[in-house]
């Protein structure tokens, strides 16, 4: 279950969840919209409150802006989108994006095997 759905089922607002998890409402918003991945401490706190969260599903809820053009082959568009997605981050956030992509590809492979 994604983060937003789990939070809504619990009856908590973003602000209430943030207070219980020791973070800010804006962090919860970023997590729910897929703009950020949680730090280990935040992930643990949220999961202690809401139960297990599918962070891949949560991340895929957000928009992925890639600027694809209509005349690109689908695989070119995907490769360019991944490149933009990784290149636009720095430091820890870039590492988080690589971890997300690895987990996503693993889940995708399991889905189609």
Image: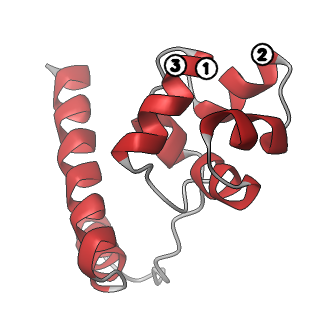
Q: Specify whether residue 82 is in view.
A: no
Please tell me which residue is depicted at 52% across the width and 19% down the height of the picture.
48
Q: Quadrant of the C terminus?
A: top left
Q: Are marks 3 and 1 in contact (CB under 8 Å)?
A: yes
Residue corresponding to mark 2: 10
Task: Label 2: state its secondary structure.
Answer: helix
Q: Is residue 93 left or right of residue 108?
A: right
Tell me how many marks there are. 3
Which of the pair 113/85 is nearer the observer?
85
Q: Are marks 1 and 2 in contact (CB under 8 Å)?
A: yes
Q: Position of residue 88 (x, y in %)?
A: 36, 85
Quarter assignment of residue 49: top right
Mark 1 or 2: in front is: 1
Q: Position of residue 93 (x, y in %)?
A: 33, 70
Residue corresponding to mark 3: 48
Which of the pair 105/13 is nearer the observer?
13
Residue corresponding to mark 1: 49
How many other residues sit within 10 Å of disc 1, few (<14), some (14-19) or many (≥20)? some
């Amino acid at each position: 279950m994604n983060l937003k759905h789990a939070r809504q089922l619990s009856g908590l607002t973003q602000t209430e969840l943030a207070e219980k998890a020791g973070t800010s409402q804006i962090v919860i918003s970023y997590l729910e919209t897929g703009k950020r991945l949680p730090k280990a401490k935040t992930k643990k706190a949220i999961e202690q409150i809401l139960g297990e969260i599918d962070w891949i599903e949560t991340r895929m809820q957000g928009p992925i802006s890639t600027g694809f053009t209509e005349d690109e082959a689908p695989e070119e568009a995907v490769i360019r989108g991944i490149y933009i997605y990784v290149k636009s981050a720095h430091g820890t956030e870039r590492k988080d994006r690589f971890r997300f992509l690895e987990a996503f590809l693993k889940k995708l492979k399991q889905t189609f095997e």
